[in-house]
Amino acid sequence: ILPIAQQFVTEGEAVGFSVSVTGGLSAPVITVESLPPGASFNSATREFLWLTGRGDRGSYRVGFRAASGQSVAYQDVFM
């Protein structure tokens, strides 16, 4: 998984990014853990989207995992 920078967002704003994979993973399956409330991840398009709302202030960690055969890659994104 290519590095994803820390994301900064203000309550009421949207944050979104794509998850890209390189390095020999052929047709990887990407899964996500610890989605913030109201956030979504489309595994087909590899797009993360979160329209933050009132009360979403704080720090969040979202974990992405790409797997293909026996190859696995991980990336945590902090917000």
Image (tube, rainbow, N blue to C red):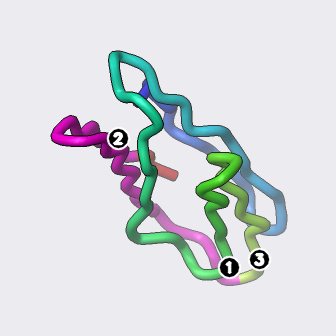
Q: Residue furthest left?
A: 70
- Report which quarter residue 69 is drawn in: top left
Callout in the foreground (1, 3): 1
Q: Can you identify the residue that label 3 sits on?
A: 53
Mark-to-mark CA distance, 3 and 2: 25 Å
Q: Crowding near pointer 2: few (<14 within 10 Å), some, many (20+)? A: some
Kindly identify which residue carries mark 2: 75
Q: Which residues are magenta?
A: 55-76
Residues at marks 1 and 2, CA–CA distance in whole angstroms: 21 Å
Asked whether disc 1 touches disc 3, contact meaning CB atoms under 8 Å apart, the reply is yes
Amino acid type of disc 2? Gln
Residues at badges 1 and 2 in contact (C-beta under 8 Å)? no
The tag earlier along the polypeptide, 1 or 2, is 1
In the displayed structure image, the side of residue 20 where residue 72 appears, left or right: left
Q: Position of residue 40 (x, y in %)?
A: 65, 68
Seen in the picture, residue 13 relative to 77 is either above or below; the reply is: below
Residue 38 image label: 1
Query: x, y percentage for residue 22?
Result: 43, 20
Q: Secondary structure at mark 3?
A: loop
Q: Find residue 14 and report its image quarter.
A: bottom right
| Residue most extreme to the top | 23
Q: Is residue 36 left or right of residue 67?
A: right
